[in-house]
Amino acid sequence: MTTAIRCGTLIDGTGADPVRNATIICDVDKATIVDVRRDGDVPRDAEVIDAGHLTIMPGMIDCHVHLGSSTWGVQERLLTPFSLIVAHALNHARVTLEAGFTSVRDAAGTPRGVKMAIDQGLFPGPRLRIAVSALSQTGGHGDSVMPNGANIRPVSELPFTVVDGVEAVRKATREVLRAGADQIKVHTSGGVMSPNDEPGATGFSPDEIAAIVYEARAAGKTVMAHAQATQGIKNAVLGGISSIEHGIFLDEEVIEEMKRRGTYFVPTLVAPLWVIRRAEKDPSSVPPYALRKAREVMAAHQASFRLAVERGVRIAMGTDTGVGPHGTNAEELERMVEGGMTPMQAIVATTRTAAECARIAHLTGTLEVGKRADILGVSGDPLSDISVLQHKEKLALIMKDGRAMKPLGAASLVPA
Ligand SMILES: [Zn+2]
């Protein structure tokens, strides 16, 4: 079966100029794009989707979400069993797809069953690449022992990964891989939401990082690093980690090294903003230490992003959603434009570059022959107003793997 999508304006995700009146031809059985025609010709047997009034672009990709996290305070977390977290994660997956995101890279907290349930068609959601559990040193960003000594980490199937020393991190990496990780997540610095450390603190030693990267590569996987402190970013980059998450305190030297090595930068500009917004709305949802740290890092974070854009670092879009509400992911594009990107650069960061960073570029990220038909139809022009992508009602068509998850004319996703 063949589907022909008549496009008003086509933004293909490569960064090329938009094209008027192109037609995308999809082989529905293979879920792939088989032709992109400039002349608007349609095969005789094709089912035609007339999106001539829409901007057509690739389904968006968020390289840093936590589907298993919610914008909850400590008390709600303590009252929530892991099985309920899984149910929420599946709901978050649906909400994320509804927001136009057909793929996401999960940066820890989501078990493999959530990915399998989506792949098996039990629940609607984006294509997932999961990190399962994030490795952290004792007292580091992933250590959820509170000042009173209680550990608020839920009991779950996720491997316990607060570990120290080369042999322990090696074993933890192998356990996370056994639990189904598509990439390894590691904390090479402190962070905002953690009770015991500061964003400027370095986490893990270079020999620990080397062991983690070795084990990941041995399994054919990459490593993503939560890295905010300058030294933590440097250790990660020099250790061969493939993406720097947050990157709050970048400097000229590490930026040059990232460019030389092709390291990705996933900024998550909205994350500290959401900590502050949540605290303003409901102080009990954010511990005081997190609010203080979010306020302290804002200016440095934005300056680092601006510098990275100017210097031409490979930037892939990511939000840290879970810190903020699921489904609000597309606000990040507006923040990226505010921080110095053109709307086209922000779109490429959220399509082609995000696909490369998540290692799914062979499947998605651009609308080119041979790619999966992950397609977004937008009522409006994101190149003149990037915020249009934040409005669910403007996302008139959402297609994943050649299947219209939200068909033209529908108000919401079709049931799985
Ligand atoms: Zn995160």
Image (cartoon, grey):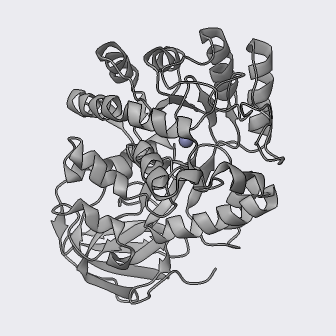
Classify residue 178 by image quadrant.
top right
Classify residue 210 by image quadrant.
top right
Residue under the point 57% across and 22% down: 188
Q: Is residue 101 above or below residue 342?
A: below
Residue under the point 79% across and 15% down: 167
Q: Is residue 333 visible?
A: yes
On the image, the x and y values in percent for residue 45 come to: 40, 89
Using the image as rendered, state which of residue 1 and residue 312 is in the foreground: 312
Residue under the point 41% across and 63% down: 59
Q: Is residue 31 above or below residue 416?
A: above
- Taking the image as shown, residue 124 lies to the left or right of residue 192, namely right
Residue under the point 59% across and 24% down: 197
Q: How many marks are shown on the rendered structure?
A: 0
On the image, the x and y values in percent for residue 91 come to: 63, 68
Q: Is residue 345 visible?
A: no
Using the image as rendered, state which of residue 416 and residue 133 is in the foreground: 133
Classify residue 118 by image quadrant.
bottom right
- Taking the image as shown, residue 137 lies to the left or right of residue 15, namely right
User: The C terminus is located in which quarter?
Assistant: bottom right
